[in-house]
Image: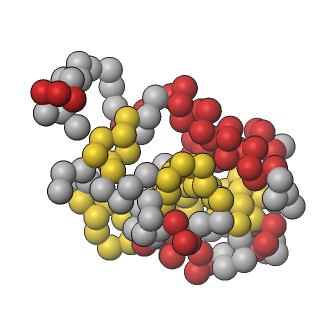
Amino acid sequence: MEDKAFPVSWDAFHRDARALAWRLSAVGGFSAIVAVTRGGLVPAGVVARELGIRVIDTIGVASYQEETQRGEVRVLKPLSETILTLPSEEVLIVDDLVDTGATAKVVRALLPKAHFATVYAKPQGRPLVDTFVTEVSQDTWIFFPWDTGLSFQAPIARGSS
């Protein structure tokens, strides 16, 4: 089966990241954010602003090669001591998407009591996150605004997905 295309504009992504912050505001109790790089950087910035959180760290995790080929999950940049000394239930992990859950499993193992939030979730990875905004099917490929440029798109009736 062909992947379904789901292009997301900057405006739509910002709206969805703010919706994530709105949901997270009801949970509360976070003193720090960990952005899963690279996709979690933008939503983490939006969520941090909306929730007034100023302690932001990153964990560098790579699970794709050549942007579309899944590979082994590797931690490229570990968590800082600042995050590791906090009670993990005060930490909010933010990523753009949970797909198969491979990245989420690695990050969750490091902060088992942290709250994990993503903007988008696919069915295989959804059980690993606590909060998300939009679920898409497993065969959907999300085109994030930082991965795309403006170009002509053929109409769906002509075989474009």
Q: Is residue 13 left or right of residue 80?
A: left
Q: Residue at x 87, y 61 (%)?
A: 29
Q: Is residue 88 above or below residue 17?
A: below
Whole-percent x, y for residue 87 in the image: 81, 75
Q: Residue furthest front?
A: 157
Q: Toward the viewer: 42 or 118?
A: 118
Residue 81 appears in the figure: no
Q: Tell me the quarter of the image containing the C terminus.
A: top left
Q: Residue furthest left?
A: 158
Q: Tell me the quarter of the image containing the N terminus.
A: bottom left
Q: How many marks?
A: 0
Whole-percent x, y for residue 106 in the image: 51, 76
Q: Quadrant of residue 47?
A: top right
Q: Residue at x 72, y 77 (%)?
A: 113
Q: Residue at x 77, y 58 (%)?
A: 32
The structure's colour scheme is secondary structure
Whole-percent x, y for residue 154 in the image: 19, 23
Q: Is residue 93 left or right of residue 143?
A: right
Q: Toward the viewer: 10 or 73?
A: 10
Q: Is residue 12 above or below residue 37?
A: above
